[in-house]
Amino acid sequence: MTKAVRVHAYGGPEVLSWDEVPTPAPSAREVLIRQEAIGLNFIDVYYRTGLYKLPALPSVIGMEGAGVVAQVGGDVTTLSVGDRVAYPSKLGAYANHRTIDADQVVKLPDAIDTRTAAAIMLRGLTVQYLLRQVRVLAAGDTILVHAAAGGVGLMLCQWAAHLGATVIGIVSTEAKAALARAHGAAHVLIGLDDLPQKVRKLTGGAMVPVVYDSVGKDSFMASLDCLAPRGLMVSYGNASGEVTGVSLSLLAARGSLSVTRPKLMSFIAKREELESASRELFDVVASGALKIEIGQSFALSEAGRAHQALESRATTGSTILIPD
């Protein structure tokens, strides 16, 4: 037997149940991972609340983790018992042990420990596709980053600065502003009040070619108004709720803008895409250009408390859960 956090009914953090469940056995193409660290992400909240539907109830939530291969299926040739591995996006992470298709995990290089891996796989690969695939960031670009002191935000600021961009970060408190500055943000704004006017002043009226917005409903229109003509709005999260009811004429009126709503799995669906993106992520972390801020950790059995902290914006950097 093993332990897992499951959702039996959609709702608040209180619905997360610490359950004893059978230790799963890997199928022919799967591996069993003894998990050492699990990443906490807003997508976990979406599954817990029912914004994203689970395949069945009860279900184990969580998308990313890292640990050691404990057992391999009969058809697996790329991994062995004892290998240190991590994965970025497969439901079922909130467990001491979990099975997963061998093609959905990557081996960890010696320079990356399992706690760091759990803090960077989903977030770091998100940053990789945002900066290197959705729109290839160029040196000299000025970009706007919402939630700049969060797990993805801090990585976005650092990686973009490493590539030669100027980052304008948006945060909710002075303490978070200091953190964003320490991780590469050249300018930091607190809150959404008068955001377009502030961005106009910082850019000398030019505005920005791209906005990275994980907040969603509350910031969407302000983000559009920060874009230069033919700019790109990258809406990659719903922390304040889903964006709905947007008229395409708004984009034309603001200078032929573009909007995209990407998701990680579209960029790592093929094995070679996952390996290539992970390799670039690990290299940037190992070089020191991307310093990982694990702002807090919780025991896996305290996942409900971790969700409360995340939803109340009491967290900074990445949050991980430690199996117990």
Image: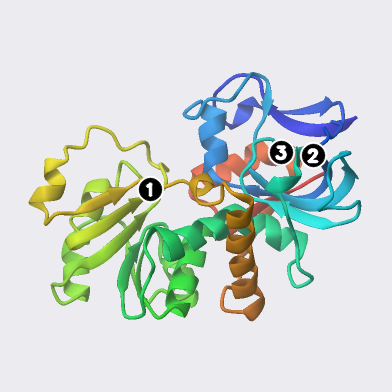
| Residue 6 in picture, x, y percent from top left | 70, 28
Q: Is residue 116 left or right of residue 200?
A: right
Foreground disc of the pair 2, 3: 2
Q: Is residue 44 left or right of residue 219?
A: right
Q: How is the image coloured?
A: rainbow
Q: Residue at x 49, y 72 (%)?
A: 159
Q: Residue at x 79, y 39 (%)?
A: 30
Which SS class for mark 1? Answer: loop
Which SS class for mark 3? Answer: loop
Question: Do the residues under discs 2 and 3 have CB atoms within 8 angstroms?
Answer: no
Q: Is residue 31 left or right of residue 127?
A: right
Q: CA distance from mark 2 to mark 3?
A: 18 Å
Q: Residues within 10 Å of mark 2 (few under 14, many from 20)?
A: many
- List the residue tagged with mark 2: 30
| Residue 127 in picture, x, y percent from top left | 49, 61
**Looking at the rendered structure, which numbered label has been put on residue 94?**
3
Q: CA distance from mark 3 to mark 1?
A: 24 Å
Q: Residues within 10 Å of mark 3 (few under 14, many from 20)?
A: many
Q: Is residue 202 above or below residue 190?
A: below
Q: Residue at x 51, y 34 (%)?
A: 46
In the picture, the quarter occupied by the C terminus is: top right
| Among numbered discs 2 and 3, the one appearing first in the sequence | 2
Foreground disc of the pair 1, 2: 2
Badge 2 amino acid:
Glu
- List the residue tagged with mark 1: 215
Badge 1 amino acid:
Val
Residue nearer the viewer, 185 or 272? 272
Badge 3 amino acid:
Tyr
Residue 148 is at least partly visible in this image: no
